[in-house]
Image: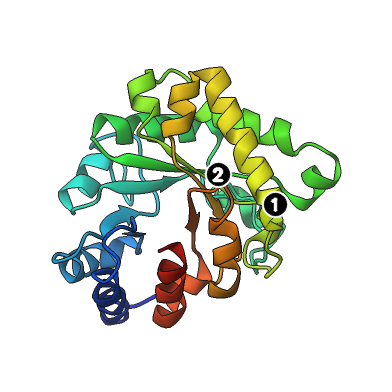
């Protein structure tokens, strides 16, 4: 939740200018709903994709304040984030009082419905999964993530599952500056790939892009992107600084 209309346009234009120098790197920008149109215009002459930060699972109707998958497609989106920990009410660093976190109420069921709606609309879901600091210390990382992954893609055909991208974002690393060690991030991303192989097939697991997200910056992105099971990064705060984000793109190259 950052950026006015004009600020988003300026940031997108800076990133677009640099992106043209790196045509081999897949880049997607996920602005707030209010900036989708201006960012769409700013990246028209590039290979950058446009994505939204959330979606509602019903196409239209009396759901004031919601935005559907067909609306996102109409706005030029090809991606949408689903199940971000903040949308699940599972925050890292935050000023939101814990008793108010139920307002952010995505569940495994709503996430599954959102992914199905995106697939129907021809959009690529970017599914976020990850454990809290308590769950990690209790040795529950794998079980928590398996529950999140398996519930989110339950009922999908293998061809649809292959359109889903997954971002491992440990909650304890979001907005805290505590980036996950690259080797550990790679281990968990590899575990997610094994989960996909068990749920669908080895070829499906190999075709799905798995990203790491959580305090990604220019100075740690190269080590993360060098890991064999990390196919990309989901950038948070650093994406608001053009030079920082551009350096991450350069590191990907």
The residue depicted at 27 percent of the width and 41 percent of the height is: 69
- Helix, strand or loop at label 2? It is loop
Disc nearer the start of the sequence (2/1): 2
In the figure, is residue 187 to the left or right of 195? right
Determine crowd level at label 1: few under 14, some 14-19, many 20+ residues with C-alpha closer than 10 A.
some
Residue 99 shows in the view = no
The residue depicted at 57 percent of the width and 19 percent of the height is: 198
In the figure, is residue 234 to the left or right of 137? left
In the figure, is residue 236 to the left or right of 23? right
Q: Position of residue 248 (x, y in %)?
A: 46, 69
Determine crowd level at label 2: few under 14, some 14-19, many 20+ residues with C-alpha closer than 10 A.
some
Tell me where residue 241 sits by quadrant.
Answer: bottom left
What is the spatial separation of the Cα atoms under label 2 and label 1, in whole angstroms?
A: 32 Å
Where 220 falls versus 117 (above or below)?
below
The residue depicted at 55 percent of the width and 36 percent of the height is: 107
Q: Please state which of the two labelled residues, at mark 2 or mark 1, is closer to the viewer.
A: 1
Residue farthest to the right?
A: 138
Residue 183's label in the rendered image is 1
Where 136 falls versus 181 (above or below)?
above
Mark 2 in CB contact with mark 1 (< 8 angstroms):
no
Where 172 falls versus 208 (above or below)?
below
Residue 246 shows in the view = yes
Tell me where residue 159 sits by quadrant.
Answer: top left
Residue 217's label in the rendered image is none
Q: Position of residue 161 (x, y in %)?
A: 40, 27
Give the quadrant of the N terminus: bottom left
The residue depicted at 60 percent of the width and 28 percent of the height is: 194
**Viewer-proximal residue, 246 or 129?**
246
- Helix, strand or loop at label 1? It is helix
Q: Position of residue 207 (x, y in %)?
A: 41, 33
Residue 105's label in the rendered image is 2
In the figure, is residue 2 to the left or right of 135? left
């Amino acid at each position: 939740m950052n950026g006015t209309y004009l600020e988003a346009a300026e940031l997108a234009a800076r990133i677009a200018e640099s992106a043209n120098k790196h045509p081999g790197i897949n880049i997607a920008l996920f602005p707030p709903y209010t900036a989708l149109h201006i960012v769409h215009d700013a990246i028209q002459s590039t290979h950058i994709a446009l994505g939204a930060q959330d979606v509602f699972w019903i196409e239209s109707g009396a759901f004031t304040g919601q935005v559907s998958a067909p609306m996102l497609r109409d706005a030029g989106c090809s991606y949408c984030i689903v199940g971000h920990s903040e949308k699940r009410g599972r925050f890292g660093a935050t000023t939101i009082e814990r008793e108010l976190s139920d307002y952010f109420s995505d569940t495994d069921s709503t996430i599954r419905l959102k992914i199905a709606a995106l697939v129907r609309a021809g959009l690529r879901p970017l599914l976020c999964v990850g454990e809290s600091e308590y769950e990690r210390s209790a040795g529950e990382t794998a079980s928590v993530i398996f529950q999140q992954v398996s519930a989110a893609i339950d009922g999908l055909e293998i061809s649809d599952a292959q359109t889903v991208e997954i971002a491992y974002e440990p909650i304890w690393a979001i907005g805290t500056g505590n980036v996950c060690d690259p080797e550990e991030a790679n281990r968990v991303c590899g575990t997610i790939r094994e989960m996909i192989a068990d749920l669908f097939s080895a070829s499906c697991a190999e075709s799905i892009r798995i990203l790491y997200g959580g305090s990604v910056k220019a100075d740690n992105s190269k080590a993360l992107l060098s890991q064999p099971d990390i196919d990309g990064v989901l950038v948070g705060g650093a994406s608001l600084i053009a030079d920082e984000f551009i350096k991450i793109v350069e590191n990907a190259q």
